[in-house]
Image (cartoon, rainbow, N blue to C red):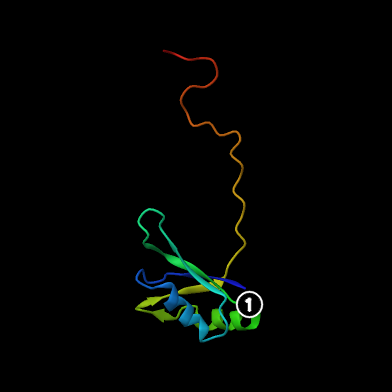
Amino acid sequence: MNIFVGSLPFKLQEADLREIFEEHGEVSSAKIITDKFSGRSKGFGFVEMPNDTEAQSAIDELNGAEVDGRAIVVNKAEQRKESPRRDNYRSGGYQGNNRRY
């Protein structure tokens, strides 16, 4: 099961996140999402647990739990929705043959 974890302390490392969830069962992966420019944590991440029973137990136990002074949000991750296609998108500027020089 893929688990969303929000309101994470910004200094929390992926190893720390993994350790928190390993208390409830096997963890396949733990990923904290970071800003692509600064590399700093965005304050949320995802944990993958192969056993759904253990994953649900982790969600039930950890949702609202305090980690480094912050109450974290833990729930089952929703499937990412596809963004609408942008085929008809026009970004302003010149449109058609009405160009002025």
Q: In this orientation, which residue lies closer to the viewer: 47 or 91?
A: 47
Residue 65 percent coordinates (x, y):
44, 81
Q: In this orientation, which residue lies closer to the viewer: 95 or 33?
A: 33
Specify the amino acid type for callout 1.
Pro
Per the image, label 1 sits on a secondary structure element best described as loop
Q: In this orientation, which residue lies closer to the viewer: 26 or 85?
A: 26
The crowding category of the residue bearing disc 1, from other C-alpha atoms within 10 Å (few below 14, some 14 to 19, many at least 20), is some
Q: Residue at x 36, y 68 (%)?
A: 10
> Dot 1 corresponds to which residue?
50
Residue 20 percent coordinates (x, y):
46, 82
Labels in figure, total: 1
Residue found at the far top of this picture: 101
Residue found at the far bottom of this picture: 23
Q: Residue at x 46, y 82 (%)?
A: 19
Q: Is 4 left, or right, of 79 in this rendering?
A: left
Q: Examine the rendered structure and indicate whether residue 2 appears above or below residue 85.
A: below
Q: Residue at x 55, y 19 (%)?
A: 96
Residue 26 percent coordinates (x, y):
57, 82
Q: In this orientation, which residue lies closer to the viewer: 38 or 52?
A: 38
* Displayed quadrant of residue 60: bottom right
Residue 13 percent coordinates (x, y):
40, 73
Q: Examine the rendered structure and indicate whether residue 79 appears above or below residue 11.
A: above
- Quadrant (top left/top right/bottom left/bottom right) for the N terminus: bottom right
- Quadrant (top left/top right/bottom left/bottom right) for the C terminus: top left
